[in-house]
C-alpha cells in the first residue's frame, strides 16, 4: 500500500488554489467515479465557494486547514481544523471563510456505481 501525506498535499494544493482563477484546487486521493468510496482533497482560497450542488450520496467533510461553511437552504454548519461535518443529503454549497483545505469523503449511490 502506498502512503501519502495529506499535509504536503494540502500545502501544494493551497498554493495552487491561491493562484488559480477559480481560487480552488482539488485532487482525488482515493477512488474515483468507478469506485464506491471516493476521497478528494479540496483547497480553496479565502472567499471562494463551491456553488450549490446536489449531494452525490453519503458524504463527510474533514477540515484540515482554515474555516469553511456548508450551507443547505437556510441551514449552515461551520468547520475549523479537526472539524468533521456530515454533508446533508440535499443541495448544498461550500464557502471558504479563510484559506482552507478539506477532505471530502463520498460513498456513491450503489446503483450508480454498479450501472
Image: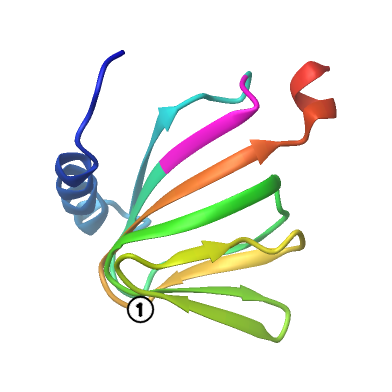
Residue 80 image position (x, y, % from top left): 34, 73
Taking depth in this image into account, of 44 and 111 the one nearest to the observer is 111
- Residue 74, above or below 80: below
- Residue 47, above or below 17: below
Look at mark 1 in the image and give the residue it sits on. 97
Residue 77 image position (x, y, % from top left): 55, 78
Query: Is 39 colored magenta in this rendering?
Result: yes
- Name the image quarter holding the C terminus: top right
Residue 75 image position (x, y, % from top left): 67, 83
Q: Which residues are magenta?
A: 35-40
- Residue 64, above or below 46: above
The quarter holding residue 2 reads top left
Which residue is found at the position 65% from the left and 38% from the top? Answer: 107
Which residue is found at the position 59% from the left and 67% from the top? Answer: 93
- Residue 87, above or below 7: below
Task: Judge left or right: residue 56 versus residue 110.
Answer: left
Taking depth in this image into account, of 46 and 72 the one nearest to the observer is 72
Q: Residues within 10 Å of mark 1 (few under 14, many from 20)?
A: some
Amino acid at each position: 500500500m502506498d502512503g501519502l501525506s495529506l499535509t504536503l498535499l494540502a500545502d501544494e494544493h493551497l498554493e495552487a488554489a491561491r493562484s488559480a482563477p477559480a481560487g480552488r484546487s482539488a485532487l482525488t486521493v482515493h477512488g474515483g467515479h468507478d469506485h464506491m468510496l471516493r476521497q478528494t482533497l479540496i483547497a480553496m482560497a479565502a472567499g471562494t465557494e463551491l456553488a450549490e450542488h446536489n449531494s452525490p450520496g453519503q458524504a463527510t467533510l474533514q477540515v484540515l486547514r482554515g474555516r469553511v461553511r456548508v450551507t443547505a437552504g437556510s441551514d449552515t454548519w461551520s468547520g475549523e481544523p479537526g472539524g468533521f461535518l456530515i454533508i446533508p443529503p440535499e443541495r448544498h454549497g461550500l464557502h471558504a471563510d479563510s484559506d482552507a483545505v478539506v477532505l471530502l469523503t463520498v460513498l456513491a449511490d450503489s446503483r450508480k456505481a454498479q450501472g
